[in-house]
Amino acid sequence: MIASGGALWLLLGADLSWVWPLVLLPYLLRHLYFLAKLTRLIRRHHRLAPPFPGGLWGEVYRSIAQYQQRGRKGRKRQIRFTRRFREAANAVPDALVILDKQHRVDWANPTAATLMNVHWPQDSGRPFVDLLPHPDLKTFVEAGDDVRPIEIAPNHNRATMLSLRITPFGERKRQRLIVGRDITKIYHLNMIRRDFVANASHELRTPLTVIAGFLENLMDAPATPLNHRRPLVLMHNQAARMRSIIDDLLTLSRLEIHERPEEQGAVDVPEELHLILQEAQVLSNGRHRVETEIEDDLLLLANQPELRSAFSNLIFNAVKHTPEGTEIRIRWSWGTDGPELRVRDNGQGIGPEHLPRLTERFYRVDRARSRESGGTGLGLAIVKHVLNRHDARLLIASEVGQGSTFTCIFPGGRGISRESLERPSAPTTAAAT
């Protein structure tokens, strides 16, 4: 009896094995339905909205709906930010142009159409140098120099003078942001000022030379009364000081005529520094302790008279404007970015409020002391102009009571080793280009 019952159950179990697929089929079909529905909604970019199915698929649908909602909010924020950016860019009085990696126009604000003849979106994808032709513009864009601007008069409006600045950005700094500013009024004012200074200096030079000559004759004449000699000496000193100011003004005017030096070659900086130091020792008359650290093998591709003027101004300023007993250290070496001249003293230092204006014409930290030392207030302005013409920069660091440091930093490509220059096969002309 028991044996027959077990056999019956085995028979029934064997017969019911086909039932399990039928039981699982609705479950699988439900999952496939919701998966296909979700795939169709995502493919058509439909928004998932309640009611959501129950169970696990409900959690999946709800999570995707929350993700879509966050995405929509992010896109709205991005649209608002883009709109505000364009409104701000359109309100800027300067011309703004964004170039892609191939230096083609990617975007431009309305002011660029007026100043640069770049219309967006009509000119989108066109090379920037084709829209604003200029001999130096291609090199300027490729170099991406964000320190020095370039001034051009565009062909579509020659009466306008533009100052262009460029900023590399994006992946590997291959894109460019170009900012163009209308400097026509400033440019013409500078031209008037420069012409006036040059003409006035030339006109004053001749009568001052005559006055100084007569004063020298009167001082040396035996018939001149003794009580007249001191006033004559003072007059002669002031005439000499005035002549020094005029010479510096003429130097500045000459530097402003051309943006770059006309003649450049390998300048023996160590030899020039030794000659300047000899003059500085005479000027100091033993009142200062001068220490030097000069790399004799390091030369510079530059204009020799201009370079001598800049270096002598820096060194003579250290002698003139620091008290007796000051230690002056002069170093010519290869720095982090290129050749460097560093003039350092441990004098009274300069207050931080004066540092931004030190290279202005006639600016003096202490007017009384500058007059006593014979300073013209033009030395650092000359230094700045010379360095700009040589793609170099001037760094000034100072602290009251700790001294001052003036550093001239030149591009690495201007450094020349004496050994390479003296080789018969040395390509010196390549360095000049």
Image (spheres, grey):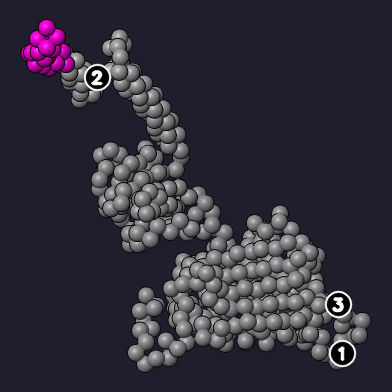
Residue 408's x, y, as percent? 57, 70
Residue 166's x, y, as percent? 42, 53
Please state which amino acid type lies under the numbered disc 1: Ala
Marks 1 and 2 sit apart, C-alpha to C-alpha, by: 110 Å
Check disc 2 and report the residue beneath it.
46
Name which quarter of the figure residue 427 lies in: bottom left
* Residue at point 50%, 82% (across, down): 299
Q: The C terminus appears in which quarter of the rendering? A: bottom left
Q: Is residue 72 left or right of residue 400?
A: left
Q: Is residue 344 left or right of residue 51?
A: right
Give whichever of 25, 200 is nearer the camera. 25
Check disc 3 and report the residue beneath it.
231
Does the residue at mark 2 contact the one at mark 3 (Cβ under 8 Å)? no
Q: Is residue 94 magenta?
A: no
* Residue at point 43%, 73% (across, down): 413
Instruction: Say what secondary structure mark 2 lies in.
Output: loop
Marks 1 and 3 sit apart, C-alpha to C-alpha, by: 15 Å
Crowd class of label 2 (few under 14; some 14 to 19; many from 20; radius 10 Å): few
* Residue 223 tag number: 1
